[in-house]
Image: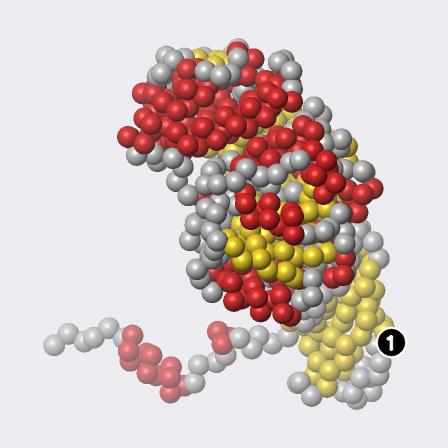
Amino acid sequence: MKVSVVIPVYNPGPYVEDCINSLVHQSLPADEYEICFVDDGSTDETPARLDKLAGEHANVRVIHQEPSGWSGRPRNVGIEATTGEYIMFVDNDDYLGPEALERMYEYGVAHHADVIVGKMAGKGRPVPLELFRENRPYASVRNAPLIDSLTPHKMVRREFLDRIGLRFREGRRRLEDHVFVAEAYLRAENVAVLSDYVCYYHVKRDDASNAGFRPIEPAGYFGNLREALDVVEKYTEPGPLRDGLFRRWLRNEIVERLRGRRLLAMDPEYRQEMFREMRAVTERFGPGVAAGLAPLQRVVAGLLSEGRLTDLETLAAWEVTVTPSGDLRKLAWRDGVLQVTFTVEYRGVTALDDGTLRLPIPESVPARFEASKVDLVIRERATAAEFYQPITFERERVPATDPAMVRLRLRATALITPGPAVGDGIWDVYIRYALAGWNKETRLGALRGPDADAGRRLGVIGGRSVLPYWTDPHQNLSLDVRESTNRLRYDLLPVRPEQVSVSGDRIAVSLPVHVDAVTTGRIRLTRAKTHEVEVDAVLTPVPGGCVLEAALTRLPAGRYRIAVGLGRSDRAPTDLRLTLIVGERGAREVRAAEDTSPAARPVPWALRKYLIRLLRPARRP
Protein backbone atom coordinates (compact mmCIF):
# COMPACT_ATOMS: atom_id res chain seq x y z
CA MET A 1 0.00 0.00 0.00
CA LYS A 2 1.66 3.22 -1.17
CA VAL A 3 -0.63 5.86 0.31
CA SER A 4 -3.26 6.00 3.04
CA VAL A 5 -5.62 8.98 2.90
CA VAL A 6 -7.03 9.99 6.29
CA ILE A 7 -10.11 12.24 6.38
CA PRO A 8 -11.68 13.40 9.66
CA VAL A 9 -15.41 13.88 9.13
CA TYR A 10 -17.98 15.84 11.10
CA ASN A 11 -21.35 16.87 9.62
CA PRO A 12 -20.09 17.99 6.21
CA GLY A 13 -23.45 17.44 4.52
CA PRO A 14 -23.25 17.72 0.72
CA TYR A 15 -19.81 19.36 0.92
CA VAL A 16 -18.21 15.93 1.31
CA GLU A 17 -19.20 14.91 -2.23
CA ASP A 18 -16.37 16.73 -4.02
CA CYS A 19 -13.94 15.19 -1.56
CA ILE A 20 -15.32 11.70 -2.18
CA ASN A 21 -15.29 12.06 -5.96
CA SER A 22 -11.71 13.30 -6.01
CA LEU A 23 -10.52 10.41 -3.82
CA VAL A 24 -12.17 7.51 -5.61
CA HIS A 25 -11.08 8.79 -9.05
CA GLN A 26 -7.36 9.16 -8.41
CA SER A 27 -4.88 8.15 -11.12
CA LEU A 28 -3.06 5.92 -8.63
CA PRO A 29 -4.38 2.33 -9.02
CA ALA A 30 -7.06 1.55 -6.45
CA ASP A 31 -5.07 -1.36 -4.99
CA GLU A 32 -2.14 0.98 -4.24
CA TYR A 33 -3.95 3.42 -1.95
CA GLU A 34 -6.60 3.29 0.75
CA ILE A 35 -9.13 5.85 1.92
CA CYS A 36 -10.00 6.04 5.60
CA PHE A 37 -12.87 8.28 6.70
CA VAL A 38 -12.98 8.76 10.47
CA ASP A 39 -16.50 9.88 11.39
CA ASP A 40 -16.21 11.95 14.56
CA GLY A 41 -19.80 11.54 15.74
CA SER A 42 -21.62 13.09 12.79
CA THR A 43 -25.35 13.62 13.31
CA ASP A 44 -26.31 14.27 9.67
CA GLU A 45 -26.70 11.77 6.82
CA THR A 46 -22.92 11.46 6.34
CA PRO A 47 -22.36 8.17 8.27
CA ALA A 48 -24.83 6.31 6.04
CA ARG A 49 -23.37 7.94 2.92
CA LEU A 50 -19.87 6.80 3.86
CA ASP A 51 -20.95 3.27 4.76
CA LYS A 52 -22.60 2.95 1.36
CA LEU A 53 -19.39 4.21 -0.29
CA ALA A 54 -17.30 1.64 1.57
CA GLY A 55 -19.61 -1.10 0.30
CA GLU A 56 -18.98 0.04 -3.27
CA HIS A 57 -15.18 0.47 -3.11
CA ALA A 58 -12.80 -2.11 -1.69
CA ASN A 59 -10.18 0.52 -0.81
CA VAL A 60 -12.56 2.67 1.27
CA ARG A 61 -12.88 2.20 5.02
CA VAL A 62 -15.09 4.06 7.53
CA ILE A 63 -14.47 4.30 11.28
CA HIS A 64 -17.26 5.66 13.49
CA GLN A 65 -16.40 7.11 16.90
CA GLU A 66 -17.88 9.31 19.61
CA PRO A 67 -17.39 13.04 18.98
CA SER A 68 -14.01 14.30 20.17
CA GLY A 69 -14.59 17.99 19.47
CA TRP A 70 -11.82 18.64 16.92
CA SER A 71 -9.75 17.01 14.18
CA GLY A 72 -6.74 15.81 16.15
CA ARG A 73 -8.13 12.54 17.50
CA PRO A 74 -9.79 11.44 14.20
CA ARG A 75 -6.49 11.95 12.39
CA ASN A 76 -4.59 9.95 15.00
CA VAL A 77 -7.16 7.13 14.81
CA GLY A 78 -6.72 7.13 11.03
CA ILE A 79 -2.93 6.89 11.33
CA GLU A 80 -3.21 3.82 13.56
CA ALA A 81 -5.87 2.14 11.40
CA THR A 82 -4.05 2.38 8.06
CA THR A 83 -0.97 0.77 6.56
CA GLY A 84 0.26 2.96 3.70
CA GLU A 85 3.91 3.88 3.25
CA TYR A 86 2.81 7.52 3.23
CA ILE A 87 -0.20 9.14 4.88
CA MET A 88 -2.08 11.98 3.19
CA PHE A 89 -4.26 14.21 5.37
CA VAL A 90 -7.37 15.69 3.73
CA ASP A 91 -10.27 17.69 5.20
CA ASN A 92 -13.82 16.62 4.40
CA ASP A 93 -14.77 19.85 2.57
CA ASP A 94 -11.64 19.99 0.38
CA TYR A 95 -10.61 17.85 -2.57
CA LEU A 96 -7.56 16.62 -4.51
CA GLY A 97 -6.39 17.01 -8.07
CA PRO A 98 -6.93 13.81 -10.11
CA GLU A 99 -3.21 12.92 -10.15
CA ALA A 100 -2.35 14.28 -6.70
CA LEU A 101 -1.61 11.02 -4.87
CA GLU A 102 0.39 9.52 -7.73
CA ARG A 103 2.47 12.64 -8.33
CA MET A 104 3.13 13.39 -4.66
CA TYR A 105 4.07 9.80 -3.87
CA GLU A 106 6.48 9.48 -6.81
CA TYR A 107 7.99 12.90 -6.05
CA GLY A 108 8.50 11.98 -2.40
CA VAL A 109 10.09 8.63 -3.16
CA ALA A 110 12.36 10.14 -5.82
CA HIS A 111 13.70 12.71 -3.34
CA HIS A 112 13.66 10.58 -0.16
CA ALA A 113 11.24 12.99 1.52
CA ASP A 114 9.69 12.54 4.93
CA VAL A 115 7.13 15.24 4.10
CA ILE A 116 5.70 16.16 0.69
CA VAL A 117 3.91 19.49 0.28
CA GLY A 118 1.70 19.60 -2.83
CA LYS A 119 0.71 22.83 -4.53
CA MET A 120 -2.51 24.26 -3.11
CA ALA A 121 -5.27 26.34 -4.67
CA GLY A 122 -7.55 28.39 -2.44
CA LYS A 123 -11.22 28.56 -3.37
CA GLY A 124 -12.25 31.45 -1.14
CA ARG A 125 -9.43 30.65 1.28
CA PRO A 126 -5.88 31.97 1.46
CA VAL A 127 -3.07 29.58 0.58
CA PRO A 128 0.71 30.07 0.49
CA LEU A 129 1.91 31.77 -2.68
CA GLU A 130 5.67 32.23 -2.53
CA LEU A 131 6.26 28.63 -1.42
CA PHE A 132 4.77 27.31 -4.67
CA ARG A 133 6.63 29.63 -7.04
CA GLU A 134 8.81 26.68 -8.11
CA ASN A 135 9.45 23.02 -7.36
CA ARG A 136 11.66 22.55 -4.29
CA PRO A 137 12.80 18.91 -4.16
CA TYR A 138 15.08 19.44 -1.15
CA ALA A 139 13.47 22.03 1.11
CA SER A 140 13.86 22.91 4.77
CA VAL A 141 12.89 25.78 7.03
CA ARG A 142 16.34 27.21 6.34
CA ASN A 143 16.13 27.45 2.55
CA ALA A 144 12.40 27.73 1.76
CA PRO A 145 9.31 29.49 3.19
CA LEU A 146 7.88 26.20 4.47
CA ILE A 147 6.65 27.89 7.61
CA ASP A 148 4.06 29.72 5.46
CA SER A 149 2.22 26.39 5.03
CA LEU A 150 1.10 25.01 8.38
CA THR A 151 -2.20 23.36 7.46
CA PRO A 152 -2.12 19.55 7.82
CA HIS A 153 -2.78 18.84 4.15
CA LYS A 154 0.53 17.11 3.53
CA MET A 155 1.78 13.64 2.68
CA VAL A 156 3.98 12.27 5.48
CA ARG A 157 6.09 9.11 5.63
CA ARG A 158 4.64 6.67 8.19
CA GLU A 159 8.05 5.39 9.31
CA PHE A 160 9.06 8.98 10.07
CA LEU A 161 5.95 9.58 12.19
CA ASP A 162 6.42 6.38 14.15
CA ARG A 163 10.17 6.88 14.60
CA ILE A 164 9.81 10.32 16.20
CA GLY A 165 6.44 9.53 17.84
CA LEU A 166 4.67 12.46 16.19
CA ARG A 167 0.90 12.67 16.51
CA PHE A 168 -1.72 15.44 16.57
CA ARG A 169 -2.69 17.11 19.84
CA GLU A 170 -6.19 15.97 20.80
CA GLY A 171 -9.19 17.66 22.36
CA ARG A 172 -11.07 20.84 21.55
CA ARG A 173 -8.26 23.16 20.56
CA ARG A 174 -7.07 25.46 17.77
CA LEU A 175 -3.80 25.35 15.81
CA GLU A 176 -3.15 21.66 16.52
CA ASP A 177 -2.04 21.44 12.89
CA HIS A 178 0.57 24.19 13.47
CA VAL A 179 2.11 22.18 16.29
CA PHE A 180 2.17 18.97 14.23
CA VAL A 181 3.47 20.47 10.99
CA ALA A 182 6.09 22.70 12.63
CA GLU A 183 7.61 19.69 14.40
CA ALA A 184 7.48 17.63 11.20
CA TYR A 185 9.37 20.34 9.29
CA LEU A 186 11.99 20.76 12.01
CA ARG A 187 12.69 17.03 12.41
CA ALA A 188 12.35 15.79 8.81
CA GLU A 189 15.49 14.81 6.93
CA ASN A 190 13.93 16.27 3.77
CA VAL A 191 10.77 18.08 2.75
CA ALA A 192 9.82 18.07 -0.96
CA VAL A 193 7.58 20.81 -2.38
CA LEU A 194 5.73 19.95 -5.61
CA SER A 195 4.62 23.17 -7.32
CA ASP A 196 3.99 22.36 -10.99
CA TYR A 197 0.67 20.56 -10.41
CA VAL A 198 -2.26 21.60 -8.20
CA CYS A 199 -2.61 18.76 -5.71
CA TYR A 200 -4.93 20.21 -3.08
CA TYR A 201 -7.99 22.44 -3.38
CA HIS A 202 -8.67 24.29 -0.10
CA VAL A 203 -12.35 25.25 -0.17
CA LYS A 204 -14.40 27.79 1.75
CA ARG A 205 -17.91 26.42 2.10
CA ASP A 206 -20.81 28.53 0.92
CA ASP A 207 -22.13 28.55 4.48
CA ALA A 208 -18.64 29.52 5.80
CA SER A 209 -18.93 26.79 8.45
CA ASN A 210 -15.47 25.27 7.92
CA ALA A 211 -13.76 24.67 11.25
CA GLY A 212 -11.15 27.32 10.45
CA PHE A 213 -13.80 30.01 10.00
CA ARG A 214 -15.37 29.63 13.43
CA PRO A 215 -14.84 32.69 15.67
CA ILE A 216 -11.79 32.34 17.87
CA GLU A 217 -11.79 32.68 21.63
CA PRO A 218 -8.76 34.93 22.19
CA ALA A 219 -7.33 33.43 25.40
CA GLY A 220 -7.65 29.85 24.15
CA TYR A 221 -6.43 30.63 20.65
CA PHE A 222 -3.27 32.43 21.71
CA GLY A 223 -2.68 29.85 24.40
CA ASN A 224 -2.63 27.18 21.67
CA LEU A 225 -0.36 29.42 19.57
CA ARG A 226 2.19 29.35 22.41
CA GLU A 227 2.35 25.55 22.03
CA ALA A 228 3.59 25.99 18.46
CA LEU A 229 6.20 28.46 19.70
CA ASP A 230 7.25 25.87 22.30
CA VAL A 231 7.97 23.39 19.51
CA VAL A 232 10.16 25.89 17.67
CA GLU A 233 12.08 26.68 20.85
CA LYS A 234 12.60 22.97 21.55
CA TYR A 235 14.16 22.20 18.16
CA THR A 236 16.06 25.42 17.34
CA GLU A 237 18.72 27.54 18.96
CA PRO A 238 18.26 31.25 19.70
CA GLY A 239 19.19 33.32 16.67
CA PRO A 240 18.09 34.31 13.18
CA LEU A 241 16.44 30.95 12.31
CA ARG A 242 14.24 30.95 15.40
CA ASP A 243 13.42 34.63 14.94
CA GLY A 244 12.43 33.98 11.33
CA LEU A 245 10.12 31.13 12.31
CA PHE A 246 8.53 33.12 15.13
CA ARG A 247 8.01 35.95 12.65
CA ARG A 248 5.49 33.82 10.78
CA TRP A 249 3.11 33.79 13.78
CA LEU A 250 3.72 37.44 14.57
CA ARG A 251 2.94 38.42 10.99
CA ASN A 252 0.04 36.09 10.16
CA GLU A 253 -1.73 35.54 13.47
CA ILE A 254 -1.20 38.96 15.04
CA VAL A 255 -0.06 41.85 12.84
CA GLU A 256 -2.29 41.06 9.84
CA ARG A 257 -5.33 40.79 12.14
CA LEU A 258 -4.69 44.37 13.23
CA ARG A 259 -4.75 45.87 9.73
CA GLY A 260 -7.44 47.24 7.44
CA ARG A 261 -10.85 45.61 7.31
CA ARG A 262 -9.88 42.71 9.58
CA LEU A 263 -9.40 45.06 12.53
CA LEU A 264 -12.29 47.37 11.71
CA ALA A 265 -14.73 44.45 11.37
CA MET A 266 -14.19 43.38 14.99
CA ASP A 267 -16.73 44.34 17.63
CA PRO A 268 -15.06 47.03 19.83
CA GLU A 269 -15.18 44.90 22.99
CA TYR A 270 -13.84 41.85 21.15
CA ARG A 271 -11.15 44.06 19.59
CA GLN A 272 -9.97 45.08 23.04
CA GLU A 273 -9.80 41.46 24.18
CA MET A 274 -7.83 40.40 21.09
CA PHE A 275 -5.48 43.34 21.59
CA ARG A 276 -4.72 42.31 25.18
CA GLU A 277 -4.01 38.65 24.30
CA MET A 278 -1.82 39.63 21.35
CA ARG A 279 0.28 41.97 23.50
CA ALA A 280 0.82 39.16 25.99
CA VAL A 281 2.11 36.82 23.26
CA THR A 282 4.44 39.37 21.67
CA GLU A 283 6.21 39.89 24.98
CA ARG A 284 7.75 36.48 24.31
CA PHE A 285 9.44 37.65 21.11
CA GLY A 286 12.91 39.16 21.05
CA PRO A 287 13.71 42.32 19.04
CA GLY A 288 14.94 40.31 16.06
CA VAL A 289 11.46 38.95 15.33
CA ALA A 290 9.72 42.23 14.50
CA ALA A 291 12.90 43.66 12.93
CA GLY A 292 12.50 41.36 9.93
CA LEU A 293 8.95 42.47 9.12
CA ALA A 294 8.09 44.73 6.20
CA PRO A 295 8.02 48.45 7.14
CA LEU A 296 4.27 48.86 7.66
CA GLN A 297 4.08 45.57 9.53
CA ARG A 298 6.83 46.84 11.84
CA VAL A 299 4.77 49.96 12.50
CA VAL A 300 1.75 47.83 13.46
CA ALA A 301 3.87 45.60 15.70
CA GLY A 302 5.32 48.69 17.37
CA LEU A 303 1.90 50.22 17.99
CA LEU A 304 0.78 46.93 19.52
CA SER A 305 3.76 46.74 21.88
CA GLU A 306 3.15 50.37 22.94
CA GLY A 307 -0.55 49.76 23.55
CA ARG A 308 -1.70 52.33 20.95
CA LEU A 309 -4.96 50.77 19.81
CA THR A 310 -6.49 54.10 18.73
CA ASP A 311 -3.59 54.75 16.34
CA LEU A 312 -3.95 51.20 15.00
CA GLU A 313 -7.62 51.92 14.22
CA THR A 314 -6.69 55.17 12.44
CA LEU A 315 -4.03 53.41 10.41
CA ALA A 316 -6.42 50.55 9.52
CA ALA A 317 -9.06 53.01 8.25
CA TRP A 318 -6.46 54.63 5.98
CA GLU A 319 -5.09 51.32 4.68
CA VAL A 320 -8.55 50.31 3.51
CA THR A 321 -8.32 53.11 0.92
CA VAL A 322 -4.95 51.94 -0.42
CA THR A 323 -5.45 49.84 -3.56
CA PRO A 324 -3.16 48.90 -6.45
CA SER A 325 -3.92 50.17 -9.95
CA GLY A 326 -2.58 48.54 -13.12
CA ASP A 327 -2.39 50.13 -16.57
CA LEU A 328 -2.07 47.69 -19.48
CA ARG A 329 0.18 49.28 -22.09
CA LYS A 330 0.81 46.54 -24.64
CA LEU A 331 -0.37 43.06 -25.59
CA ALA A 332 1.29 40.98 -28.31
CA TRP A 333 1.98 37.37 -29.29
CA ARG A 334 5.66 36.48 -29.77
CA ASP A 335 6.65 32.91 -30.72
CA GLY A 336 3.80 31.27 -28.84
CA VAL A 337 4.11 33.53 -25.79
CA LEU A 338 1.73 36.37 -24.89
CA GLN A 339 3.76 39.47 -24.00
CA VAL A 340 2.00 41.73 -21.47
CA THR A 341 3.46 45.17 -20.72
CA PHE A 342 1.94 47.23 -17.90
CA THR A 343 2.58 49.68 -15.07
CA VAL A 344 1.33 49.40 -11.50
CA GLU A 345 1.24 51.70 -8.48
CA TYR A 346 -0.74 52.18 -5.28
CA ARG A 347 -3.49 54.69 -5.95
CA GLY A 348 -3.23 57.77 -3.75
CA VAL A 349 0.08 56.76 -2.16
CA THR A 350 2.97 59.22 -2.48
CA ALA A 351 6.37 59.46 -0.85
CA LEU A 352 9.03 62.03 -0.20
CA ASP A 353 11.90 61.96 -2.65
CA ASP A 354 13.92 59.90 -0.17
CA GLY A 355 11.20 57.23 -0.26
CA THR A 356 9.59 57.98 3.10
CA LEU A 357 5.84 57.37 3.36
CA ARG A 358 3.70 59.72 5.38
CA LEU A 359 1.12 57.95 7.55
CA PRO A 360 -2.10 59.32 9.12
CA ILE A 361 -0.56 58.84 12.59
CA PRO A 362 2.52 60.39 14.20
CA GLU A 363 4.79 57.91 12.43
CA SER A 364 6.65 57.75 9.14
CA VAL A 365 8.01 54.69 7.43
CA PRO A 366 10.52 53.98 4.66
CA ALA A 367 8.79 52.56 1.60
CA ARG A 368 11.88 50.46 0.74
CA PHE A 369 11.10 51.04 -2.91
CA GLU A 370 14.34 49.31 -3.86
CA ALA A 371 12.85 46.07 -2.46
CA SER A 372 9.45 46.42 -4.13
CA LYS A 373 8.40 43.85 -6.71
CA VAL A 374 5.51 42.81 -8.91
CA ASP A 375 4.24 39.41 -10.05
CA LEU A 376 1.76 38.38 -12.71
CA VAL A 377 -0.25 35.22 -12.14
CA ILE A 378 -2.94 33.51 -14.15
CA ARG A 379 -5.74 31.91 -12.12
CA GLU A 380 -8.22 29.34 -13.41
CA ARG A 381 -11.68 30.66 -12.65
CA ALA A 382 -13.39 27.38 -11.80
CA THR A 383 -10.70 25.85 -9.56
CA ALA A 384 -8.58 28.84 -8.40
CA ALA A 385 -5.43 27.04 -9.58
CA GLU A 386 -2.79 29.65 -10.33
CA PHE A 387 0.68 29.89 -11.82
CA TYR A 388 3.33 32.59 -11.75
CA GLN A 389 4.50 33.83 -15.14
CA PRO A 390 8.04 35.04 -16.00
CA ILE A 391 8.36 38.79 -15.47
CA THR A 392 10.90 41.61 -15.62
CA PHE A 393 10.35 45.08 -14.23
CA GLU A 394 11.98 48.39 -13.44
CA ARG A 395 11.19 50.93 -10.74
CA GLU A 396 10.44 54.55 -11.55
CA ARG A 397 9.63 57.64 -9.52
CA VAL A 398 6.91 59.74 -11.15
CA PRO A 399 6.15 63.38 -10.17
CA ALA A 400 3.05 63.73 -8.00
CA THR A 401 0.60 66.62 -7.80
CA ASP A 402 2.48 67.88 -4.75
CA PRO A 403 5.93 68.91 -6.08
CA ALA A 404 7.52 67.71 -2.84
CA MET A 405 6.21 64.17 -3.37
CA VAL A 406 6.68 61.35 -5.89
CA ARG A 407 4.62 58.34 -6.96
CA LEU A 408 6.28 54.94 -6.76
CA ARG A 409 5.51 52.99 -9.92
CA LEU A 410 6.75 49.75 -11.50
CA ARG A 411 6.93 49.18 -15.26
CA ALA A 412 6.82 45.47 -16.10
CA THR A 413 6.71 42.98 -18.95
CA ALA A 414 5.39 39.50 -18.27
CA LEU A 415 5.38 36.50 -20.60
CA ILE A 416 2.29 34.31 -20.36
CA THR A 417 3.12 30.81 -21.52
CA PRO A 418 0.03 28.59 -21.92
CA GLY A 419 1.95 25.33 -21.42
CA PRO A 420 0.72 21.87 -20.34
CA ALA A 421 0.14 22.97 -16.72
CA VAL A 422 -2.44 25.50 -17.95
CA GLY A 423 -5.52 23.37 -18.53
CA ASP A 424 -8.56 24.12 -20.63
CA GLY A 425 -10.81 26.77 -19.13
CA ILE A 426 -10.99 30.47 -18.35
CA TRP A 427 -7.84 31.96 -16.82
CA ASP A 428 -8.03 35.39 -15.21
CA VAL A 429 -4.94 37.63 -15.15
CA TYR A 430 -3.88 39.20 -11.83
CA ILE A 431 -0.94 41.37 -10.81
CA ARG A 432 0.46 41.60 -7.26
CA TYR A 433 2.46 44.63 -6.15
CA ALA A 434 4.58 44.32 -2.99
CA LEU A 435 5.63 47.62 -1.42
CA ALA A 436 6.38 48.64 2.17
CA GLY A 437 4.28 45.80 3.63
CA TRP A 438 1.39 45.90 1.19
CA ASN A 439 1.14 42.90 -1.08
CA LYS A 440 -2.18 43.37 -2.80
CA GLU A 441 -3.50 42.09 -6.09
CA THR A 442 -5.65 43.59 -8.78
CA ARG A 443 -7.01 42.66 -12.18
CA LEU A 444 -5.43 44.07 -15.31
CA GLY A 445 -7.06 45.47 -18.45
CA ALA A 446 -9.76 47.92 -17.36
CA LEU A 447 -7.16 50.68 -17.79
CA ARG A 448 -5.36 50.12 -21.08
CA GLY A 449 -3.83 51.86 -24.06
CA PRO A 450 -4.51 51.48 -27.79
CA ASP A 451 -1.55 49.09 -28.25
CA ALA A 452 -3.26 46.63 -25.90
CA ASP A 453 -6.45 46.64 -27.96
CA ALA A 454 -4.54 46.41 -31.23
CA GLY A 455 -2.42 43.48 -30.04
CA ARG A 456 -5.26 41.38 -28.68
CA ARG A 457 -5.93 38.46 -31.01
CA LEU A 458 -6.48 34.74 -31.03
CA GLY A 459 -3.54 32.36 -30.73
CA VAL A 460 -3.29 28.63 -31.38
CA ILE A 461 -0.56 27.42 -29.02
CA GLY A 462 0.43 23.79 -28.70
CA GLY A 463 -2.60 22.86 -30.79
CA ARG A 464 -5.07 24.66 -28.47
CA SER A 465 -6.85 27.94 -29.08
CA VAL A 466 -5.89 30.65 -26.57
CA LEU A 467 -8.02 33.77 -26.81
CA PRO A 468 -7.15 36.88 -24.77
CA TYR A 469 -10.36 38.82 -24.21
CA TRP A 470 -11.86 41.63 -22.12
CA THR A 471 -14.39 40.50 -19.53
CA ASP A 472 -17.90 41.96 -19.23
CA PRO A 473 -18.60 44.39 -17.73
CA HIS A 474 -15.29 45.25 -16.04
CA GLN A 475 -13.10 44.90 -19.15
CA ASN A 476 -10.33 42.94 -17.42
CA LEU A 477 -7.93 40.65 -19.25
CA SER A 478 -8.71 36.91 -19.24
CA LEU A 479 -7.68 33.94 -21.38
CA ASP A 480 -10.12 31.49 -22.93
CA VAL A 481 -8.19 28.24 -23.44
CA ARG A 482 -9.67 25.80 -25.93
CA GLU A 483 -12.99 27.55 -26.55
CA SER A 484 -14.35 27.49 -23.03
CA THR A 485 -16.57 30.44 -23.98
CA ASN A 486 -18.37 31.35 -27.21
CA ARG A 487 -16.18 34.41 -27.82
CA LEU A 488 -14.00 32.89 -30.53
CA ARG A 489 -16.60 33.43 -33.24
CA TYR A 490 -16.62 37.16 -32.58
CA ASP A 491 -12.84 37.38 -32.81
CA LEU A 492 -12.70 35.58 -36.14
CA LEU A 493 -15.37 37.80 -37.69
CA PRO A 494 -15.68 39.48 -40.02
CA VAL A 495 -13.79 37.39 -42.58
CA ARG A 496 -13.81 38.89 -46.07
CA PRO A 497 -14.37 36.79 -49.19
CA GLU A 498 -10.89 37.62 -50.49
CA GLN A 499 -9.42 35.83 -47.44
CA VAL A 500 -10.66 32.52 -48.88
CA SER A 501 -9.17 31.02 -52.02
CA VAL A 502 -10.37 27.93 -53.88
CA SER A 503 -8.05 26.44 -56.46
CA GLY A 504 -8.41 23.01 -57.99
CA ASP A 505 -9.17 20.63 -55.16
CA ARG A 506 -7.79 22.93 -52.42
CA ILE A 507 -9.41 25.51 -50.18
CA ALA A 508 -7.35 27.95 -48.08
CA VAL A 509 -8.52 30.46 -45.48
CA SER A 510 -6.21 33.27 -44.33
CA LEU A 511 -6.86 34.36 -40.74
CA PRO A 512 -5.30 36.95 -38.40
CA VAL A 513 -4.45 34.27 -35.84
CA HIS A 514 -1.07 33.70 -34.19
CA VAL A 515 0.08 30.09 -34.51
CA ASP A 516 3.23 28.80 -32.81
CA ALA A 517 3.72 25.77 -35.08
CA VAL A 518 2.04 23.79 -37.85
CA THR A 519 -0.98 22.05 -36.33
CA THR A 520 -4.34 20.58 -37.24
CA GLY A 521 -7.72 22.17 -37.89
CA ARG A 522 -11.02 21.52 -39.68
CA ILE A 523 -13.09 23.02 -42.46
CA ARG A 524 -16.81 22.31 -42.67
CA LEU A 525 -19.01 23.10 -45.71
CA THR A 526 -22.78 22.91 -45.23
CA ARG A 527 -25.48 23.20 -47.92
CA ALA A 528 -28.93 23.99 -46.52
CA LYS A 529 -28.43 21.35 -43.82
CA THR A 530 -28.84 18.62 -46.46
CA HIS A 531 -25.24 18.13 -47.49
CA GLU A 532 -22.32 18.53 -45.11
CA VAL A 533 -18.64 17.93 -45.70
CA GLU A 534 -16.04 18.23 -42.92
CA VAL A 535 -12.40 17.68 -43.76
CA ASP A 536 -9.18 17.76 -41.77
CA ALA A 537 -7.05 20.81 -42.46
CA VAL A 538 -3.53 22.01 -41.79
CA LEU A 539 -2.99 25.26 -39.88
CA THR A 540 0.28 26.91 -40.92
CA PRO A 541 1.82 30.08 -39.46
CA VAL A 542 2.60 32.85 -41.95
CA PRO A 543 3.73 36.46 -41.39
CA GLY A 544 0.85 38.37 -39.81
CA GLY A 545 -1.36 35.35 -39.19
CA CYS A 546 -1.98 31.83 -40.46
CA VAL A 547 -3.47 29.82 -43.32
CA LEU A 548 -5.92 26.96 -42.83
CA GLU A 549 -5.77 24.68 -45.88
CA ALA A 550 -7.53 21.46 -46.84
CA ALA A 551 -8.28 19.22 -49.80
CA LEU A 552 -11.85 19.26 -51.14
CA THR A 553 -13.78 16.38 -52.59
CA ARG A 554 -16.07 16.99 -55.56
CA LEU A 555 -19.07 18.97 -54.35
CA PRO A 556 -22.59 18.98 -55.84
CA ALA A 557 -23.71 22.34 -57.16
CA GLY A 558 -25.12 24.66 -54.50
CA ARG A 559 -24.36 27.29 -51.89
CA TYR A 560 -22.21 26.18 -48.92
CA ARG A 561 -21.64 27.96 -45.63
CA ILE A 562 -17.98 27.87 -44.59
CA ALA A 563 -17.01 27.08 -40.99
CA VAL A 564 -13.56 26.46 -39.50
CA GLY A 565 -12.14 24.74 -36.44
CA LEU A 566 -8.71 25.72 -35.13
CA GLY A 567 -6.49 23.33 -33.20
CA ARG A 568 -7.83 20.55 -30.99
CA SER A 569 -11.38 21.36 -29.94
CA ASP A 570 -14.63 19.55 -29.26
CA ARG A 571 -16.63 22.63 -30.22
CA ALA A 572 -18.43 22.84 -33.53
CA PRO A 573 -16.48 24.78 -36.20
CA THR A 574 -17.09 28.53 -36.26
CA ASP A 575 -19.29 29.87 -39.03
CA LEU A 576 -17.34 32.52 -41.00
CA ARG A 577 -20.54 33.96 -42.54
CA LEU A 578 -19.15 33.26 -45.99
CA THR A 579 -20.76 31.29 -48.80
CA LEU A 580 -18.94 29.07 -51.27
CA ILE A 581 -20.94 28.93 -54.51
CA VAL A 582 -20.41 25.79 -56.61
CA GLY A 583 -21.84 25.80 -60.14
CA GLU A 584 -23.00 22.90 -62.30
CA ARG A 585 -19.65 22.85 -64.08
CA GLY A 586 -17.68 23.15 -60.85
CA ALA A 587 -17.12 26.91 -60.98
CA ARG A 588 -16.50 28.28 -57.50
CA GLU A 589 -16.91 31.70 -55.96
CA VAL A 590 -16.82 32.99 -52.38
CA ARG A 591 -19.27 35.64 -51.27
CA ALA A 592 -20.35 37.21 -48.00
CA ALA A 593 -23.31 35.24 -46.67
CA GLU A 594 -26.68 36.90 -46.48
CA ASP A 595 -27.49 38.11 -43.00
CA THR A 596 -30.35 35.94 -41.76
CA SER A 597 -30.51 37.42 -38.29
CA PRO A 598 -33.94 38.71 -37.15
CA ALA A 599 -32.70 42.31 -37.35
CA ALA A 600 -31.92 41.90 -41.06
CA ARG A 601 -35.21 40.33 -42.11
CA PRO A 602 -37.68 42.60 -43.97
CA VAL A 603 -40.65 43.74 -41.88
CA PRO A 604 -43.99 42.59 -43.38
CA TRP A 605 -46.05 45.46 -44.83
CA ALA A 606 -49.02 44.85 -42.52
CA LEU A 607 -46.73 45.06 -39.47
CA ARG A 608 -45.05 48.18 -40.86
CA LYS A 609 -48.45 49.96 -41.25
CA TYR A 610 -49.37 49.02 -37.69
CA LEU A 611 -46.09 50.39 -36.33
CA ILE A 612 -46.51 53.62 -38.34
CA ARG A 613 -49.97 54.20 -36.85
CA LEU A 614 -48.69 53.32 -33.37
CA LEU A 615 -45.76 55.72 -33.52
CA ARG A 616 -47.52 58.61 -35.39
CA PRO A 617 -48.11 61.61 -33.06
CA ALA A 618 -51.74 61.92 -32.00
CA ARG A 619 -53.75 64.65 -33.74
CA ARG A 620 -54.88 67.56 -31.66
CA PRO A 621 -58.69 67.94 -31.28
Left or right, 104 with reference to 478:
right
Q: Which residue is mark 1?
A: 505
Q: Nearer the viewer, residue 569 or 13?
A: 13
Q: Is residue 606 above or below residue 214?
A: below
Q: Which picture quadrant has residue 148?
A: top right
Residue in front for this viewpoint, 467 or 168: 168
Quarter of the image where the C terminus is located: bottom left
Pick out the residue farthest to the left.
621
On the image, the x and y values in percent for residue 282 come to 46, 19
Q: Is residue 572 above or below residue 322?
A: below
Residue 195 in view (yes/no) = no
Identify the residue at image location x=34%, y=34%: 266
Quadrant of res 27: bottom right
Left or right relative to 86: residue 247? left
Neighbour tally class for label 1: few under 14, some 14-19, many 20 plus, Cα within 10 Å: few
Rendered residue at 34%/25% (across/down) = 313
Q: How is the image coloured?
A: secondary structure
